[in-house]
Image (tube, grey):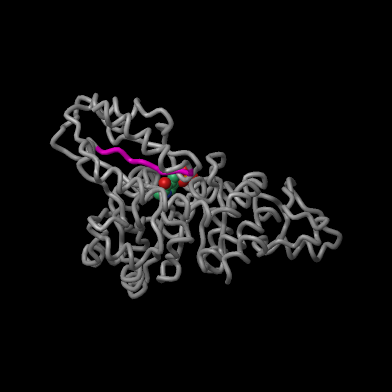
Amino acid sequence: MDLSFILNELGEERDQYFNAIAPPIIQTSNFAYGKVEDMRKAMADEYDAFLYSRGNNPTVDILCKKLAALDGAEDCLVLNSGAAAIFAAVFANVKSGDHIVSVKEPYSWAQKLFNDILPRFGITTTYIDGTDIENFERAILPHTSVIYLESPNSWTYALQDLQAVAELAKAENIVTICDNSYCTPIYQQPIKYGIDICIQSATKYISGHSDTVAGVLTGSHSMLKRIFNSEYMSIGSGIQPFNAWLLLRGLRTLPVRLERVSATTGKIVSYLKAHPKVESVIFPFDESFPQYELARQQMTGACGLLSFVLKAGTAQQVELFCESLQHILMAVSWGGYESLVIPKIVGMNPADFNSNLPEHRMVRMYVGLEDAGYLVADLEQALEKL
Ligand SMILES: *Cc1c(COP(=O)(O)O)cnc(C)c1O
């Protein structure tokens, strides 16, 4: 399906709402029926009906159609956060006593699910280095039900060979789930490599304006219908119509924003690599990246997230750099219009700082929509302080 058709037309039935160009926010909790038989059908199968907005809602439905098509998937569910999407996808595919194989250091709230919540149901998780397919083969147990991936990882940028993992999992009857927040479907489509469920934090690039929290699940009709009828409806964390509308608005410009972010990121990477106060830059589309070949093969683009290691002797110097930035903000999240940094040491006790460990001197940067020159000038004056 044509990308422009998906973004501008798919799912939009303008004759149903005064031929308005922008779809309405159908801010309603429930839908009325004239015939008992129609209502009976809707109650028996809410997945394909408008009955109550904890289930389906027309504004959300437009968004779902577009997001499913972008991923090359049959169906889509949009939840109130990426974390809720992770929870629903994993929870729907495990039972008491099962085992999960996960890439190491997945998104923090996926780790909390695996480490703190699922063990209460006797579900254990083995973390592996997902850069080598043999590590998956070794970790799989007879009761493994889910393989959890994040490619690239939003901190380490580690990739998995999605097709190889999907083939291995299919042969063992294991459900594969992949967090695709880094690439979005514009730059990578895990479903096409055979992955069963694709997750995105729509808070990041899909929203694109740092004003909405949401999460996306895509996959087969049967898989998503099953998740809808259990976790999705029980947790009741489906996205609200207004937030769905904001995501629709974000989607219109997604490819253009990513193009801009990618171009600027390339310039920032070159600038940082040449800077004497920067030891190294970690970015999947940089030739020095250990999995560069796989990144080029599996992803059609890499966008705004990169990390760099400062030549800093103390934690204070890393802090000085971050606090000296005048335009680039220090904040969590990414994918919006504004550039951001977050130093790795923000998550550790400053007393544990060890300047011999590059990881402690690492800063993650998200490149937003500003001019490259504007960002370089800000980085330059902050690096000069080191
Ligand atoms: C932000 C993020 C999530 C969680 O999404 P929320 O919308 O914040 O709940 C999941 N995975 C990755 C890679 C993320 O960056």
Where residue 273 sits in the image (x, y, percent)? 25, 46
Which sits in the foreground, 264 or 342?
Answer: 264
Magenta span: chief secondary structure: strand
Where residue 96 sits in the image (x, y, percent)? 39, 55
In the figure, is residue 373 to the left or right of 384? Answer: right
Which sits in the foreground, 347 or 208?
Answer: 208
Farthest-out residue, left: 356
Residue 86 seen in the current view: yes
Where residue 85 sits in the image (x, y, percent)? 49, 51
> What segment is highlighted magenta in the picture?
362-369
Q: Quadrant of residue 383?
A: top left
Residue at image point 64% right, 46% down: 240
In the image, is residue 366 part of the stretch drawn in magenta?
Answer: yes
In the image, is residue 94 part of the stretch drawn in magenta?
Answer: no
Which sits in the foreground, 161 or 298?
Answer: 298
Residue at image point 37% right, 61% down: 146
Q: Quadrant of residue 307?
A: top left
Residue 125 seen in the current view: no
- Number of labelled discs? 0
**Quarter the C terminus occupies:** top left
In the figure, is residue 139 to the left or right of 5? Answer: left
Farthest-out residue, bottom: 171
**Quarter the N terminus occupies:** bottom right
Which sits in the foreground, 324 or 119?
Answer: 324
Residue at image point 56% right, 60% down: 67
Where residue 272 sits in the image (x, y, percent)? 28, 43
Question: Vertical placement of 65 versus 320: above or below?
Answer: below
Residue at image point 19% right, 35% down: 311
Farthest-out residue, right: 34
